[in-house]
Amino acid sequence: MDDEKRQGLLSVILPSCNEEASVPRAAEMVSALLAQAGIAHELLFVDDGSRDGTWAAIQAQAARFSQVRGVRFSRNFGKEAAIFAGLAQARGDCAAVMDCDLQHPPEKVVEMYRLWQEGYQVVEGVKVSRGKENPLHTLAARTFYSAISGAMGVDMSKASDFKLLDRRAVDTLLAMREKNAFFRALSSWIGFSTAQVEFEVQPRLEGQSKWSVRSLVRYAVTNIAAFSAAPLQLVTLMGVVVFLCSLGLGIWSLWQKFTGRALEGFTTVILLQLLIGSGLMVCLGIIGYYIGKIYEELKDRPRYILSERCGGEKERGQAEKTL
Ligand code: UDP
Ligand code: MG
């Protein structure tokens, strides 16, 4: 395959959730750009349980363009699941993941593909700026990324889901059995020869962001737990600190008793009880959370369930077998 520059089919994966307005625009723009650059491609829309006309829009695009295919989830499984479904369906020699709302500039995909041609196996989109956000959101994101970067030992502060992966890297990711996969981090964690492409986050043209504060917090907690056992070690650390304090306090109380100054200190007892009680419960909560995660993984449920597919009529027979 390698004679100077490799050639190959590029699969572009576009997770879409309630994006009826963005789907036609994305299909047209990305297709036109890649065709112009002379890159053989397929577009793979993953409808993540949309409640609007997204699926109809995808079907319409699949009827219009032979290179457009779509799969539909039986309900909303989240963007991570949508990305993995796209990777599983991709037939390309390399696969790019980008947001369907065009906040990831499509022309950068061409740049990523060129780097892939040069032999890179993972090409990461790196945010130059985070676009327009409120300061609280930026602060929260920064805290989350420093936690996850610490857990992984890889700087994640500018990471995004905008990436292009070689078939090798795609297959490596697909072979991972963990259900709680965090694409952005895992695709760095797997290694391979990596290049970076800088991009500016574009303003959203249609609709609005699907993230609420609640879903962002849940996302952060889940992914930190998926990548790190540090909170569990924190429990041990808290135990050690409390133990040291109790040693000091114990000696002091005994001293009080033997010098005949005990009996006072009812408030101290109440405060200590409250402190230890709540500390223990928080620790149990952290441990419980991890046990819950183990339970989830143990059940080995699929990451997502497909209900429908469209496009790629020619390869239908083959596709049906892989469903
Ligand atoms: N998305 C998805 N499932 C979800 C939420 C979002 O597939 O449950 C898709 C969405 O359609 C979009 C991309 O993930 O293509 C990024 O979502 P969004 O634009 O809402 O997030 P933001 O750009 O604000 O981070
Ligand atoms: Mg967006």
Image: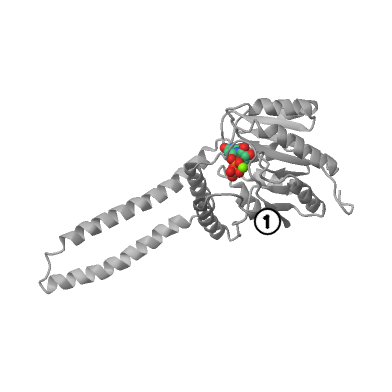
Q: Which residue is mark 1?
A: 191
Label 1 beta carbon less than 8 Å to ligand 1: no
**For residue 274, side relative to residue 36 (left or right):** left
Tell me if I can see residue 268 in this picture: yes
Q: Position of residue 123 (x, y in %)?
A: 72, 52
Where disc 1 sits, the SS reads: loop
The answer to which image quadrant residue 41 occupies is: top right
Could you tell me which quadrant the C terminus lies in? top right
Q: Quadrant of ligand 1?
A: top right
In the picture shown, does residue 151 fall above or below 69?
below
Q: Position of residue 62 (x, y in %)?
A: 75, 28
Is 298 left or right of 3, judged from the image as shown?
left
54 or 191: which is nearer to us? Answer: 54
Residue 17 placed where, x, y %? 60, 34
Which colour scheme appears in the figure?
one colour
For the residue carrying disc 1, how many other residues have a C-alpha within 10 Å: few (<14), some (14-19), or many (20+)? Answer: few
Q: Is residue 319 left or right of residue 300?
A: right
Looking at the rendered structure, the number of numbered marks drawn on it comes to 1
Q: Is residue 308 visible?
A: no
> Foreground: 245 or 127?
127
Q: Residue furthest right?
A: 3
Q: Amino acid at mark 1?
A: Gly
Residue 42 picture quarter: top right
- Residue at the (28%, 57%) spot, across then down: 275
